[in-house]
Image (cartoon, rainbow, N blue to C red):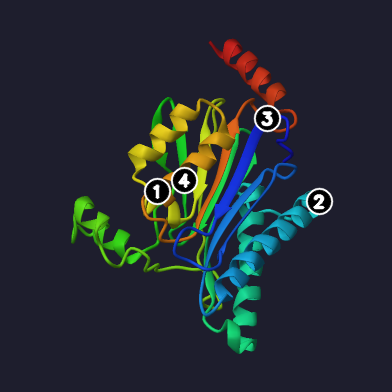
Amino acid sequence: MNVEHAIKVTRLTDVGLHRDHNEDAVASDLSIGLLVLADGMGGYKAGEVASEIAVLTLTAELTEAMLHKASIRFMPGLLPESQMLISAIDKANATIYQISQEQPQCAGMGTTLVVGVFTDNKLVVGHIGDSRLYCLRDETLIQVTEDHSLLQEQLNAGLITVEQAKTASHKNLVTRALGIDPEVELEVQVFDVEVGDLFLLCSDGLNDMVEDELIKRILLEANGNIELAANKLVQAANDLGGKDNISVIIALIEKSFPAEGGWVKSLLGRVKNKKTK
């Protein structure tokens, strides 16, 4: 869905202070409502290959799917965008896995992924690994995704506390990644969107260094200047050590974006409700 009239987006990626190259990849295309961020891993520079393949494949597959949306048979009970996202991820996973098997220099490569597709005042969210999506609404920062990581599993099981997790040595051990195995499970959810919402997609190079409270403060103090917010978030991560690549995508919801005919359905619904009272 084209949301260029309703949403403002900025994206920024930085190598950090300790890495010699950037294995993160970011992209956005509001003509199809897409935001995507990938954090690659693997042998020498193979991580950046995996993340770039993920972003390029996903963008191309979703663009193609939306062009031919009317001819696709969708599963009942599942948003078309959710189904298209799952299919696109399957294609990206297969592509990365095949190259990792055929090219010795790419053996074992993979990538985390967090992706959002805006449609009909909703955000379809998909993620694999520990890249995150946050929503800032009414001065409250919500972590929409839950990391697929050993650390998160230990937190969920009550084996460690939140305070212990902050200093854990195994923060970056993910339990799910794109391209590592022939098949991968994408976690998909649908998040209702309100005007004024601010969405942040980030790699763990941000949230490993910058606590949520500081992330929230930076977003609030930027007061809608999302370019300033992105720069300050990256700078904060570097000021606190910059141990990894740092990538952010920020989307500000400026207007409602109902699907075509959405306002008509809403009006008819209100009329129907009045008649039944």
Eye-nearest disc, 1 or 2 = 1
Residue 255 occupies quadrant = top right
Q: CA distance from mark 1 to mark 4?
A: 6 Å
Q: Please report the residue visible at 59 percent of the width from the left and 85 percent of the height from the top.
A: 105
Q: Which mark is residue 235?
A: 4
Q: Position of residue 177 (x, y in %)?
A: 49, 68
Q: Position of residue 67 (x, y in %)?
A: 81, 51
Nearest the camera: 149 or 188? 149
Q: Which mark is residue 91?
A: none
- Callout 3 touching callout 2 (CB < 8 Å): no
Query: Which amino acid lies under the numbered mark 4 shown in the image of this protein?
Result: Gln
Query: Which amino acid lies under the numbered mark 1 shown in the image of this protein?
Result: Asp
**Residue pointed to by mark 2:** 67
**Residue pointed to by mark 1:** 239
Regarding mark 1 in the picture, which secondary structure is present there? helix
In the rendered structure, the answer to whether residue 228 lies left or right of residue 130 reads: right
Q: Which quarter of the rendering shows the N terminus?
A: top right
Q: Position of residue 56 (x, y in %)?
A: 70, 62
* Badge 3: residue crowd in 10 Å (few <14, some 14–19, many ≥20): some
Regarding mark 3 in the picture, which secondary structure is present there? loop
Residue 119 occupies quadrant = top right
- Callout 1 touching callout 4 (CB < 8 Å): yes
Q: CA distance from mark 1 to mark 2?
A: 44 Å
Of label 4 and label 2, which has the lower sequence position?
Answer: 2
In the rendered structure, the answer to whether residue 222 lies left or right of residue 57 reads: left
**Residue pointed to by mark 3:** 6
